[in-house]
Amino acid sequence: MWTSMRLHYHMIHNNYLRQQGIQQLFIWHEVWTPQRCAATFGFCLCAVTYSCSCRIDVATEFCHTNWLAKQNDSVKEKSRKAGYENVGVALLTYPVLMASDILLYQSDFVPVGEDQKQHLELTRELAERVNYLYGGSRKSWEALTLIIFYFDHRHGGAIFKVPEPLIPPAGARVMSLSDGLSKMSKSAPSDQSRVNLLDTKDVIANKIKCCKADSFPGLEFDNPERPECNNLLSIYQLISSKTKEEVAQECQDMNWGTFKTLLTDALVDHLHPIQVRYEEIIFEPSYLDGVFAEGATKAAAIADATLNNVYQAM
């Protein structure tokens, strides 16, 4: 809910936000995470994140928010689309809240796309700053060299783990179907710019048929003059579980009509099991509520211990 309210989305009905939240939780639980070791829960079910965020705010300098406004690609893009005069402070402070949501659970690795790497860099910097200011003896920290401090953040008693990014070798940044230079985003105004996991076969076929292409002969990866071609080939590579070399060889002599049919069929086949599972459990609210409640309990046990350490240190 908080994520959806960063900008002025006051026209979106709460029921719509709740429905979208349930869908995203289902997707995370059933698709992205190994269920035996993952805890899936709604952000609002673990409210200690807000308390932790307030403490990290104390260690966040103005230069961090200034960097977010001027350098962070995600913030700049959302600001541009919303109009700079309509941007609320929440858009600038949200990355600090996101950092809290990572650091509370003492994460070793965080799976991110290339566009989110900057946010994780801020998270790492804030973790190191809190550890420096409040973790153990500050004098012992000041006696260390910068190199030792950077590579051994636990010396002196760390409050937060400093997480590492986990970026996939392929598909780290999937681009829009409408513009090969813009990221595919579920918050983009046009639904034609993306493939949603619950899109029907006909909807997927229409989106791929109408997606932006080019007039070059054949298909190829990594041509800077053909961003849409590179993007669509990358999507096919991901969902077909083929190597980049295999896709390049398979598709090099295809025209767009042939390839778009191939991509459509691959997408439909790939998403079908997910959609079947969604239809099986979406009308079982007791199952979903149980999953999310159990996840919130597991998460709270870790978060509460971390927040208590933050309280004691600060």
Image (tube, rainbow, N blue to C red):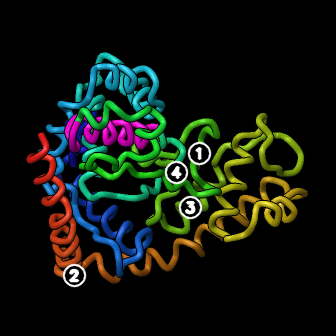
Which secondary structure lies at badge 2? Answer: helix
Is disc 1 surrounded by few (<14), some (14 to 19) or many (20+) residues within 10 Å?
Answer: many
Q: Which residue is mark 3?
A: 204
Q: Which residue is mark 1?
A: 175
Is tag 1's residue or tag 3's residue first in the polypeptide sequence?
Answer: 1
Kind of residue sitting beneath label 3: Ile
Residue at the spot 58% in from the left edge and 73% down from the top edge: 270
The answer to whether mark 3 and mark 4 are in CB contact below 8 A is: no
The mark found on residue 287 in the picture is 2
Is tag 2's residue or tag 3's residue first in the polypeptide sequence?
Answer: 3
Q: Which residues are magenta?
A: 118-137
Kind of residue sitting beneath label 4: Arg
Q: x%, y% of residue 43?
A: 21, 56
Give the CA separation, mark 2 to mark 3: 29 Å
Kind of residue sitting beneath label 2: Tyr
Q: Which residue is mark 4?
A: 194
Inspect this view and state whether residue 189 appears.
no
Inspect this view and state whether residue 278 appears.
yes
Q: x%, y% of residue 81?
A: 42, 27
